[in-house]
Image: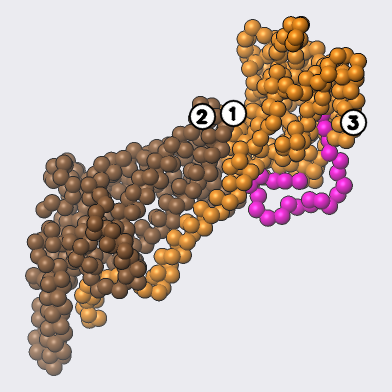
Chain colours: A orange, B brown
């Protein structure tokens, strides 16, 4: 919800025409790096998020786990997902905890799906932000998101999600969740730096901790994300609260929308043009015989 | 007169249970009973409410100015499915009302083969096989049926995304737009042909009646059915009388008395 002046804009939802200021300044891409292997599930990030965004305390849902509620909510952007997992082959228990929030995709499905001009913007630094004043509450972003992040508020009839604390980042601060993390599992910096840090940590896990499949989650099916994880087992991201191995934006939003919508509009406008020129070329069909001039 | 489908009682259709009145003057024919007109305009109101609110959601950069009519973008989105539901329900009654009149027949295949003559307006009166509805009108009817069904199914999927899932919403979104835009193209043609494109048609949906000349010009087979007369013969007769009147008026300019004139286009004036 930062003002649009604060960052250079990279992409605007539902926008026809040029994007003011794009490419005029050098911008670094920002990134959150979450080391799942050092998360202790303390939920300090959840509290910090609620606090920074001035969200009211909301009821939690107890489902026989430590998880605060099943999914993120319109006023609960940040949620630790818990999963008790038995390792193969020895059946050792692993307690997997992943901080779930907007992934700030390089190719955002929400932005592709959104028809409202300027309701979703992507800044050159990679942050994907919702501007609620332009939101029309159609919830297409909800279906466009591969991570089930945007959430609808039925009373304001608008959609909300994690802003990557664009208001803090714009002021030179790190996001609230990063600030609150006591274990150093959360990091914030440039995408290049975070990627390097994450690769180093994954290498450590592979070499020294017996996690042969440890790796960095930065899915290339959506050109990477501005939130990256180090997972113990990169081959099974689904174990971490349903993180998709291969997140995809529905093909209707990536290709068909941009073909079908203009074609449909052309068909509709052809109807209008057809009747206009029919009137010009052939004129009306009056009941016959037509009245003589002095009878009209 | 049997102008429409049989299962309904003629009086109910014409007067809609006493709530409406259709005055058929001399030289006119009953085209649409009150019930049909009521349904038509109910469908039309819901159609345009859904269309305008839908356009504001479809492309806010282009049609965002329509949103304030419904209380802004989010209200537009909130009301749109209800308008759509109203359209579907009203249209369902109209479908039942018209389905027999709209059944596709050999005459419609012939009409479609000769559509270029219709479009170019080459015949002074339509071919003798054109009945209550011509092939084009029937095409539009079935287009609205299938388009409306597609809009309903995709609309419901989008209305309840938590039930349908994100992929079906994403597919519905585009199909919904295509169906709506095809119907939008159709509505331009419908409005044109029922107003300035074919003068004398609009009153069929307001007063419910058309002139006999309109009937033999545009729907000769229907004219034959309701009057038992030959449309082409009556048309020729009207032309002959018109020519006579022209001669008489030419005479009246030389001092003779101008003859009394009956309702325009009536052969029995």
Residue A196 is labelled as 3
Which numbered tag is attached to residue A10? none
Q: Are marks 1 and 3 on the same chain?
A: yes
| Quadrant in which the N terminus of chain A is drawn | top right
Residue that sits furthest to the front in the current view: A89
Element carrying mark 1: strand
SS for dot 2:
helix
Q: Is residue B39 left or right of residue A202?
A: left
Question: Magenta: predominant secondary structure element?
Answer: loop
Q: Chain of mark 2?
A: B
Looking at the image, residue B210 lies above or below residue A52: below
Q: Give B13 or A96, whichever is nearer the viewer.
A: A96
Q: Residues within 10 Å of mark 3 (few under 14, many from 20)?
A: few
Mark 1 falls within which chain?
A: A
Q: Are marks 3 and 2 on the same chain?
A: no
Dot 1 corresponds to which residue?
Answer: A153
């Amino acid at each position: 919800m930062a003002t649009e002046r604060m960052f250079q804009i990279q992409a605007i939802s539902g926008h026809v025409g040029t994007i003011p200021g794009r490419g005029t300044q050098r911008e670094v891409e920002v990134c959150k790096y979450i080391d799942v292997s050092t998360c202790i599930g303390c939920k300090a990030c959840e509290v910090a998020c609620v606090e920074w965004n001035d969200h009211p305390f909301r009821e939690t849902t107890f489902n026989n786990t430590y998880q605060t509620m099943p999914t993120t909510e319109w006023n609960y952007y940040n949620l630790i997902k818990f999963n008790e997992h038995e390792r193969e082959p020895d059946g050792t228990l692993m307690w997997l905890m992943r901080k779930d929030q907007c992934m700030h995709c390089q190719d955002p499905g929400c932005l592709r799906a959104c028809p409202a001009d300027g309701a979703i913007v992507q800044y050159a630094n990679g942050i994907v932000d919702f501007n609620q004043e332009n939101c029309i509450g159609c919830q297409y972003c909800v279906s466009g998101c591969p991570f089930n992040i945007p959430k609808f508020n039925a009373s304001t009839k608008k959609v909300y999600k994690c802003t990557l604390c664009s208001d803090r980042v714009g002021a030179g601060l790190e996001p609230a969740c990063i600030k609150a993390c006591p274990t150093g599992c959360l990091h914030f910096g440039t995408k290049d730096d975070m990627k390097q840090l994450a690769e180093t940590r994954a290498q450590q896990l592979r070499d020294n901790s017996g996690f042969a499949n440890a790796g960095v989650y930065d899915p290339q099916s959506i050109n990477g994300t501005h939130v990256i994880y180090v997972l113990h087992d990169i081959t099974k991201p689904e174990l971490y609260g349903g993180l998709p191995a291969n997140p995809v934006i529905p093909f209707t939003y990536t290709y068909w929308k941009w073909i079908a919508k203009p074609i449909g509009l052309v068909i509709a406008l052809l109807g209008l043009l057809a009747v206009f020129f029919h009137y010009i070329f052939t004129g009306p069909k009056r009941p016959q015989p037509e009245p003589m001039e002095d009878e009209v | 007169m049997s102008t429409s489908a049989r299962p309904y009682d003629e009086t109910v259709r014409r007067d809609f249970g006493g709530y409406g009145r259709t005055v058929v003057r001399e030289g006119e024919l009953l085209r649409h009973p009150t019930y049909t007109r009521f349904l038509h305009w109910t469908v039309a109101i819901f159609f345009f409410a859904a269309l305008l609110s839908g356009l504001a959601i479809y492309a806010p950069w282009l049609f965002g100015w329509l949103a304030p009519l419904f209380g802004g973008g989010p209200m537009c989105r909130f009301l749109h499915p209800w308008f759509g539901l109203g359209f579907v329900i009203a249209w369902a009654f109209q479908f039942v009302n018209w389905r027999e009149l709209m059944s596709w027949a050999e005459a419609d295949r012939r009409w479609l083969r000769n559509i270029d003559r219709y479009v170019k307006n080459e015949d002074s009166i339509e071919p003798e096989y054109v009945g209550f509805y011509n092939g084009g009108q029937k095409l539009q009817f079935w287009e609205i049926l299938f388009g409306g069904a597609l809009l309903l199914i995709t609309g419901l999927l989008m209305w309840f995304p938590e039930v349908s899932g994100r992929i079906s919403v994403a597919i519905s979104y585009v199909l919904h737009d295509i169906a709506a835009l095809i119907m939008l193209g159709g509505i331009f043609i419908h409005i044109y042909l029922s107003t300035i494109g074919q003068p004398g048609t609009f009153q069929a949906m307001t007063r419910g009646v058309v002139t006999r000349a309109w009937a033999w010009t545009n729907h000769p087979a229907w004219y034959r059915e309701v009057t038992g007369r030959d449309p082409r013969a009556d048309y020729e007769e009207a032309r002959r009388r018109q020519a006579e009147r022209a001669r008489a008026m030419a005479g009246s300019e030389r001092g003779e008395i101008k003859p009394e004139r009956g309702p325009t286009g009536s052969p029995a004036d």
